[in-house]
Image (cartoon, rainbow, N blue to C red):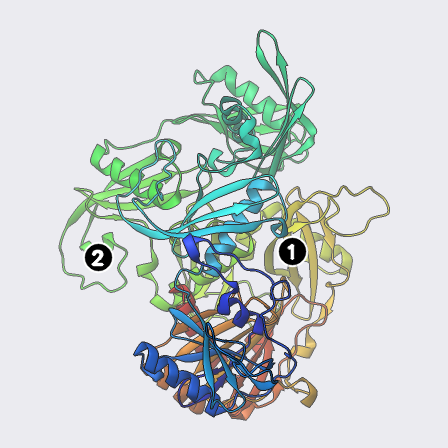
Amino acid sequence: MKTYNYEHLTTKQSQIVTALVLSGILSLGSGLTFIRSAIAAPVPDLLVNTTTEDLPPSVARAVLQDISRREGVLASQLMISEYNQTTWRNGCLGAARPGEFCTQALVPGWQVVATDGNQAWTYHTNSQGRSVRLANSVEIGNKLPSSVRSAVVQAATRRLQVSSSRLQIAEAKQRTWGDSCLELAKPEELCNAVRVAGWQVVVKSDTDSLVYHTNRSGSLVRVNEKASESSDKKLPNRIRKGLIKSASRLTGVDETIFDISDAKKTRGGWRVTVVGNGQRLVYDLIRELTMGYNITLDKKASKTTLPLDVAQRVLIQAEEISRDRRDLKIISFQRQQWSNDGWQVTVGTKDKRWVFLSDSQGKRIELVNNNTPPDNGNLPNRVSNAVLRDASNWSGISTSRLKITKAEKQTWSNPCFLTFARVCNKAYIPTPGWIVTVNSDSQTWVYRVNEDASVVSLDRSPQMSTTAARMIKVDAARRARQEGMDLGNELRIIALEEKPDWDNSCGNERNCNRGEFGWQATVSNGRNSWVYRVKDDGSDYALAVEVNLPKNIANSVLADVAEETGKPVNQFRIVNVEKRQWSDSCLGVRRIDIQCVRVLTPGWQVTVSNGKQRWVYRVGESGAIALDEDAGNISIDSKTNPVPIPSSELPPPLESGIVFRQISSGGFTGATYETILLDDGRLIRVRMGDANDSERTVGRISWQKLQEFENLLQQKGFGEFSNMKYPADRGADYITYTLTSRDGTIQYNDISQKNLPPNLRSLVSVWNLMVNDVQAQGY
């Protein structure tokens, strides 16, 4: 697709199907959004659509001038978003007015779509623009953003356990909600009385119709149970809630994460499947004449991380100790090398906790602590309430599931230390308050609060440089989206530790940064967390994989590669960890010795290196590991020197009006994206091959930043590295980046970036930071 403003031309990637959508196939009447196929609903009077020649400037000028005269809009505020060469069947160019006589002749010409961002106009013209006719105009301001569409479809996919191809957005309306809970507060949840702009979206499958409330960007999504029509609604609500509570009690997963994915009538009862956070529990309900339903759990059909036999037997033993039997549930668990590979399981109520050790089958269980009450140090109610309110609003966890485990009086020498400020005048201004520790089901947060609770601080971002904090938060948000997580309201840095040697685990890895000041930072959205090591200036960061991967699994992987190579285990280190869902119980690796069950198996892809080679493992949460023969044992010696890019692989040069272009391809999704920076400051990102152009995002940088970046291209000598590439490891699942300026092209991948020359590496860091800034602002 080509894009024009009044004076100059620049290139964008798109398809003519978008022009057809904007020319009338997209309907926004009554708040409904429908997208139909351009093939199923062809434009009348369109005879030929086969060429891709450039739009003549005279045609572009004629269209923009006509809109300017009609609408009173400056031509400089308009752009041509789509165009298509065609042949009209008559002299009216396929846009006859009522009662108008049209000569029956074939007229070569163009179909052109122009927009000011709020409205789109579709024109039919002859070949040189001497004759132009307005065919259609539509408002486009209510188009559902792709980020909201994606978030809603993901939520519906998880709830209904169906493929996204079986779901359809049936309705989308802009709404302004009356509170921070989008008018869908959970029991005991505290909601701020603020107005939140967003959307009401209806998603339909073959059997269900779900109504979702979202904020503007789609980072917060909630289902409206009352307005939805789900097949599980035939199941009595009392039974539905009871099954979800049972699933939460057995797995340690919050009730709000679970949904009924299937409820089928059986002879005399129901068969119900409860799913959430990778867990699946299948219940059989048989109606009895006097006792209601007899409920049994089908252990063979269920899939949980903690074995059900262990969960049930630990709960039985805990019930003998606790008086609050109804509220007793599993809070957390982890693998424990006890009694030949067992489990450590924490069981609790609202205000009590017990820790048990169990063998792998739950046949031997021992209590290891007996609920020591917390030391709250006479914490004032106003302080505890303020802390719990903030923790609940941020994490989305109700205050009843949060617990203050410790509170200490503290006096800071200056108010800036209360708020983790990086810059402090160090004047002596005594500031009394409290250090308060809050425990959720899976995380611990340490707050700083002043005496009257007017300042409640948790996020340690101010202690770091703005760039470093922003870089790791953007990366954590990307990982959360890849793993299908709901980000919630915001990302916070909940723990921070100075690291004088920011990467002290280099091992034998070459080109490893040593001796530079930095941090180990934990980024959290209230439910999930990621630990990073990051330089103080934000120029480099890495996921602290040995922290994010369970220690026993990390040890197993390292031991296996040591045994495979016959070398000491201390010569290897884990260099990358990615969350994955494997397709079967064998982690997607064909086995001849055991039968593999086709069931989604949560786990990780783990990459190990000794500085010369890399081994890629597939790992399950249960501890099962398998070497990926196709991706493993890869030589990394080829990364040392750049090589010329073959002329057949070079992308086309930049069109007039484009300053810089990035094409990224490969990785886990295999999608290819193009990001271009225009000379008017616009930053446009599209997914290449996206026929509906549904993932297009447009942002803008300031004129000052644009000038600074253009100057940087000259200062760093981009042209010195022209048409060179820093090759990817063969067989590895890395993303390849192709960068093009007016001086040439360079290519690298997300691992070889560390091997770029310093000037080039700093330029890439500035580009990435600029793109991430625009992305964080929602384009």
Answer with mark 1 or mark 2, whichever residue precedes in sequence: 2
Which residue is at the front of the view, 718 or 686?
Answer: 686
The amino acid on which the numbered mark 1 sits, given as a three-letter code, is: Gln
Q: Residue under label 2, please give it.
A: 416
Where is residue 11 drawn, in percent x and y? 51, 83
Residue 265 visible in the displayed image: yes
Where is residue 773 drawn, in percent x and y? 39, 69
- Say if 130 sits above or below 453 in the image: below
Where is residue 62 drawn, in percent x and y? 43, 87
Q: Residue under label 1, please give it.
A: 605
Where is residue 110 drawn, in percent x and y? 54, 83
Could you tell me which secondary element the residue under label 1 belongs to? strand
- Say if 734 sits above or below 760 in the image: above
Q: Residues within 10 Å of mark 2 (few under 14, many from 20)?
A: some
Could you tell me which secondary element the residue under label 2 belongs to? helix
Q: Is residue 265 left or right of residue 13?
A: right
Residue 758 visible in the displayed image: no
State the quadrant of the N terminus. bottom right
Q: Is residue 597 left or right of residue 94?
A: right
